[in-house]
Amino acid sequence: MSFLVLTSLLCSYLVGAIPFGFLFSRAMGKDVRQEGSGNIGATNVNRVLGKKLGVLTLLCDVAKGFLPVYVASLVLPPSVNSEIFIALCGLSTVVGHMFPIYLGFKGGKGVATALGVFLYFSPLSILFALLFFVAVVYMSGFVSAGSLTAAALIPLFIWLLGSSISTVLVALVIAILVWLKHSSNIGRLIRGEEKNWKTKESA
């Protein structure tokens, strides 16, 4: 593996690790990790700091997923393995968000950042996944349920739309990581304790 590839992977991780939700909360004199669900992602930022900063966090987390992969596609020389390396940069970005070095490797759940990564590889897959996300959240009232559904379906959509096997495999790994990071949400869903956006109470 060349120096350029290793540098691209490292830079992808470091960009993915930028904790925008945490930074925005600190700018407001708060620590989003100490309020709400304790997560640094857009959902908790919206809950703690309001809709505007929640949307801003979402956009920044999506952008930091998309940009490293896009830049890697520009700087890595074309080769038999270039598509694999670009896909791995996407994985590194999501891992950076989930386990950021800047916050002691305690980060977010990776949904928005993964959205940015997949937006590069297969925008149409994102459209289909978002439709399922909206439908599940609307019917159930649980954002976590929508996120889990979308994450599970993305690898399938990417495969059906003809992406390479390396991209499909990376998408599968990211989906598994997203589910693992949602383990506490899954437990609350099973126990009927997950917060429901319709009632704004535990459902």
Image: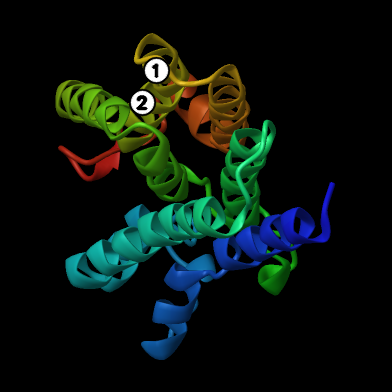
Q: For numbered disc 2, what is the local secondary structure?
A: helix
Which quarter of the figure has residue 201?
Answer: top left
Image position, residue 159 (x, y; %): 44, 13
Q: What residue type is disc 2 on? A: Ala
| Image position, residue 121 (x, y; %) | 41, 36
Q: Label 2 belongs to which residue?
A: 150
Kind of element beneath mark 1: helix
Query: Position of 128 compared to 89: left or right?
Result: left
On the question of residue 157 being in view, the answer is yes
60 relative position to 76: left or right: left
Tell me the residue at 73%/67% (across/down): 101
Q: Quadrant of residue 143?
A: top left
- Crowd around label 2: few <14 · some 14–19 · many ≥20 (10 Å): many
In the rendered image of this protein, does residue 200 appear above or below residue 10? above
C-alpha distance separating marks 1 and 2: 5 Å
At a point 55% along the width and 70% down the height, the residue shown is 18
Image point (37%, 9%), residue name: 160
Query: Label 1: few (<14), some or many (≥20) within 10 Å?
Result: some
Q: Image quarter for residue 11?
A: bottom right
Task: Name the residue beneath numbered marker 1.
Answer: 153
Nearer to the camera, 55 or 194: 55
Residue 143 falls left or right of residue 23:
left
Answer yes or no: is residue 47 visible: no
Q: Is residue 157 depicted above or below 193 in this figure?
A: above
Residue at image coords 57%, 66%? 15
Residue 107 position, x and y percent, is: 60, 58
Whether tag 1 and tag 2 are in contact, CB under 8 A, the answer is yes
**On the rendered image, what quadrant is the C terminus found in?**
top left
Q: Amino acid at mark 1?
A: Leu
